[in-house]
Image (cartoon, grey):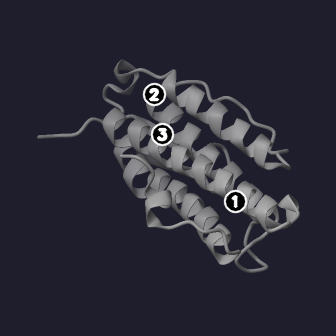
Amino acid sequence: MSISMYAASVPVLTQMLDSLSDVLSKAEAHAVAKNIAPEVLLQSRLFPDMFPLTRQVQIAADFAKGIAGRLAEAELPAFEDNEQTFAELQTRIANTKSFISSLNVAQFTDSETREVVLRPGTPKEKKLSGQAYLLNYGLPQFFFHVTTTYAILRHNGVEIGKKDYMGAY
């Protein structure tokens, strides 16, 4: 039995975007309850050379739309990376989910063998099959940034756990 590229991507991305949205809601509520300025959490990072929470969420959203869009051969929407508030990050996640949900199963037909070109025209250009892109590059990158967002919030005392990270499945 095989699994479709659509099934291995869109539902997984959607589940984790939902959980990302939920942990951000809990973070915002935590900031209010503890009288913490929201920007303290939004600009928090695990180590000085890592991106802050806001950028982690932006990159997670970018990977989600990129994975689904490239596999479906759809034009990717452009986001400006200018979010500064929890509400703006929630909008970014909602826009990403809207784009992903607009793609249909048929668009993913034969996407496992479709060539995906990363950083085209640059010295870092890399060509992968759709399956290698999804399993070996896209999903690991996406999960890294979702996990780092979770870790930043947990490190800052937001009461979230594994169930929050996993979301509804």
- Name the one closer to the observer, 8 or 126: 8
Vertical side of 42 occupied by 50: above or below: below
Report if residue 140 is visible in the image. no
Q: Amino acid at mark 1?
A: Ala
Residue 22: where, in percent of width, then height?
Answer: 59, 49
Spatial CA distance of label 3 from label 1 is 20 Å
Picture quarter containing residue 124? bottom right
Instruction: Say which amino acid is labelled 2.
Output: Ala
Could you tell whether 1 is left or right of 163 in the image? Answer: left
In this view, the mark in front (2 or 1): 1
Q: Mark number for residue 27?
A: 1
Tell me the CA gap for discs 2 and 1. 33 Å
Measured as percent of width and height from the top left, residue 48 is found at 79, 79
Residue at the image point whose x is 49% and y is 35% from the top:
68
Residue 107 higher or lower than 46, as above or below: above
Numbered badge on residue 14 = 3
